[in-house]
Amino acid sequence: MDLTNQKIVIIGGSSGIGLATAKAIVAAGGNVVIASRSEAKLNAAKAEIGERVTTFSLDITNEEEVQKLFSSVGSFDGLVITISVEAMGAFVELDSQVARQIFENKFWGHYYAAKYGAAQLKPSGAIIFFSGYASQKPVPNLSIMASVNGALEALARSLAVELSPIRVNVVSPGLVATPLYEGMPTEQRQNYFNYVADSLPVKRIAQPEDIAETVLYLINNKFTTGAVIDVDGGARLV
Ligand SMILES: NC(=O)c1ccc[n+]([C@@H]2O[C@H](COP(=O)([O-])OP(=O)(O)OC[C@H]3O[C@@H](n4cnc5c(N)ncnc54)[C@H](OP(=O)(O)O)[C@@H]3O)[C@@H](O)[C@H]2O)c1
């Protein structure tokens, strides 16, 4: 794949799937703008990516900061949003404010990014949202994640029609070994990863590079739009 002269904006590009995607785009000859909140994470990611990378510090929940990002970027070819949020808990016990914050970050973050990014995207360009397998497979304690991911999938289908010819798609991963799990004690995390790997049809969990491949496919393929691509090792089936 040749992404020479393409400019891709990745909000959430300083870690995990977003960082792996940034590296894959640069390896294919493209340029990336990575955005996230922490300057320290952005600088570390920039050093890892090495070339053809610029950084932008923002909180995606701040509508004005999102507008400023796209004013500074100018015309571009692809928008990828990989910001992460996490909330687990029994439906009747989960604090409603925590649940609201999930929508504030993940739903409204994607919404603002698509809204202001679309104005600068080339007509041949692509928007890629991130949901997660809980939107399709009911799992106890994940109802709020299921809801926000389902809302994003519905928004993407709608935008695929309304923002046409810009393509709008969603990547839906299962468990991916990223810094999202760094808060777990090492042994507990490894046991969890092993347990999930055993349960999956593919018998392993994903690495961020597995998911980045799908993002590159969606940037490159000019005939896919309004789709949710499940890259979950079969998690939604078992
Ligand atoms: N990893 C999994 O197992 C898994 C499973 C299913 C779905 N997913 C989805 O895949 C996507 C990527 O996940 P990941 O595991 O790669 O996450 P990650 O490693 O935690 O990276 C998340 C990135 O988002 C940035 N970010 C978080 N909140 C932000 C905000 N309010 N404004 C701007 N940037 C923000 C973080 O940087 P800063 O801290 O600097 O802001 C970081 O660069 C997410 O949508 C996640 O829900 C992941």
Image (cartoon, rainbow, N blue to C red):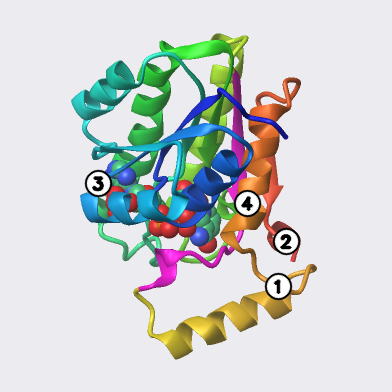
Of 220 and 140, which appears nearest the observer? Answer: 220
Residue 177 inside the magenta-drawn segment: yes
Disc 4 versus disc 3: distance between alpha carbons?
Answer: 22 Å
Q: Which percent across, then down, holds residue 158?
A: 56, 19
Q: Of the numbered discs in the image, which one, if any, rests on residue 37?
A: 3
Q: Residue at x 35, y 21 (%)?
A: 73
Amino acid type of the residue tagged 4 in the rendering = Ile
Disc 3 versus disc 2: distance between alpha carbons?
Answer: 30 Å
Q: Residue at x 44, y 48 (%)?
A: 50
Disc 1 versus disc 3: distance between alpha carbons?
Answer: 31 Å
Whichever of labels 1 and 3 marks the residue nearer the N terminus, that label is 3
Amino acid type of the residue tagged 1 in the rendering = Arg
Disc 4 versus disc 1: distance between alpha carbons?
Answer: 14 Å
Task: Identify the element where label 3 is drawn.
Answer: loop
Task: Identify the element where label 2 is drawn.
Answer: loop
Q: Of the numbered discs in the image, which one, if any, rests on residue 204?
A: 1
Looking at the image, do the residues carrying marks 4 and 1 touch, with CB atoms under 8 Å apart?
A: no
Whichever of labels 2 and 1 marks the residue nearer the N terminus, that label is 1
Kindly report which numbered mark, 3 or 2, lies closer to the viewer in this rendering. 3
Q: Residue at x 53, y 48 (%)?
A: 23
Looking at the image, do the residues carrying marks 1 and 3 touch, with CB atoms under 8 Å apart?
A: no
Residue 6 inside the magenta-drawn segment: no
Whichever of labels 4 and 3 marks the residue nearer the N terminus, that label is 3
Q: Which residue is mark 2?
A: 233
Amino acid type of the residue tagged 2 in the rendering = Gly
Q: Which residues are magenta?
A: 167-182
